[in-house]
Image (spheres, rainbow, N blue to C red):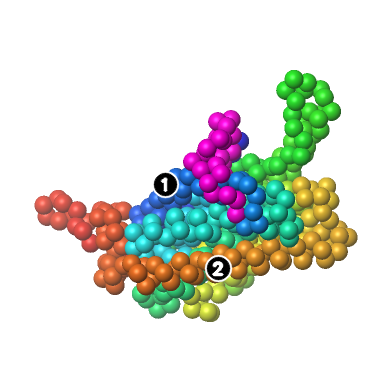
Amino acid sequence: MLVATLLVLMMTVPALALFYGGMTRSKSVLNMMMMSFISMGVVGILWILVGWSMEFGTDGVVFGNPFELFALKDVATSDYIYVMFQLTFAAITAALISGAIADRVKFSSWIVFLPFWSILVYFPMSHMVFGCTGSTLICDKIGAQDYAGGTAVHINAGIAGLVLALVIGKRIGFGKEPMRPHNLTLTMIGAGLLWVGWYGFNVGSIVFATSFDDSDPTSKDSIAFLTQFYSETGRTFANTTMATMAAMLAWLLIERLLHGKATSLGAASGIVAGLVAITPAAGAVSVWGAVALGAIAGAICAWAVGLKFKFGYDDSLDVVGVHLVGGIVGTLLIGFFSTADGAGGIDGLLYGGGFGSLVDQFLGVLVAIAYSGIITLVLALAIKYTIGWRVTEEAEVEGIDFDQHGETAYDLHTSLSGAPKTTALS
């Protein structure tokens, strides 16, 4: 768990910061990376105060008692590693949203948004999905399978990103001038680090029905624990790997067919799409089910990232096309590809299980979209009509990095005195 926690921590900083930072224009890269870094700080502190209690406090349908375990009251230090593991999930979910609103948002408004969204949206969603203590909405009452966060993390962040993009509006020049990634090397490094870190995300989410007896390693329960441990670890690790490979190849194939070239950005995006899609299904499907799921998700997401131009919403770094669409695809396909010998013990439609699992998965997706979408909309509008979301037009054109942080990522031009000029690269 300690290793898994460190890997997921790495997924936000530096992996997501690099992945998103490289995809922005050079005048916005520091601001983009800072949005990931600040998410760790704000969400992490809130998680310790009320997040853990809202996820694992006395059970409720939507959220646990926020005061029962407030500030880790009565939580044993032996549980702190798992507390930190769940903290990293909360932080990266919030950070993922930032990619949809790159290049145009005041840093202060993002900081105000983070605590409200975490408390009102993520902490309840994590309870509904990961709490699983008898009456939680998605896990227990609906019975949808979500191994490591297809609904709580990816659909949640994806629909929030879409709502914010619609409320905040388009970047100046969107659809009229090129807004290409400024450094695909950073993006490729970030994608590679995300892939490695995702093993902590998925494999670390293993849940055991039995426990290991330290006093008698040869007991029936201990042997059952070890058998389950090796089986589920191997399945989850293999499925995460194979789905990601298949998604990358499918994305590149669709890209080649649609645009005539297979790009490095396509490879990086395909990797993330595969990781997103396998997240809810990592323990539920066979290895060949994972390959099929990854290939389907990679192809659909490669097509879906173009929808922003068709429908006119400015999802800057394809959070909607990759995380929302990938999360929906991966969660729904559990209803087709899950097997009874997987973590959920349920056969999907293609294994003779009928439509029951598919209906459960659909309802889980519907709840995640509705809950996150409605509350995010209220928060987005509240901020828009109070402190406002957007930087000035001049700041957006000249460079949000210098306007919001007093810095530029690349001081390539200097004045005669040798001091860096304040105008950022476009």
The image quarter in which residue 61 lies: bottom right
Residue 262: x, y in percent?
Answer: 56, 63
Mark 2, residue position: 373
Residue 2: x, y in percent?
Answer: 57, 34
Q: Is residue 424 visible?
A: no
Tags 2 and 1 touching, CB below 8 Å: no
Q: Is residue 364 visible?
A: yes
Mark 2–mark 1 distance (CA, rounded to whole Å): 24 Å
Front residue of 68 and 102: 68
| Residue in the picture at 77% in, 50% down | 344
Front residue of 66 and 284: 66
Q: Is residue 81 magenta?
A: yes
| Residue in the picture at 38% in, 71% down | 384
Furthest-right residue in view? 352
Q: Earlier in the sequence, mark 2 or mark 1?
A: 1
Mark 1, residue position: 41
Q: Which residues are magenta?
A: 63-86
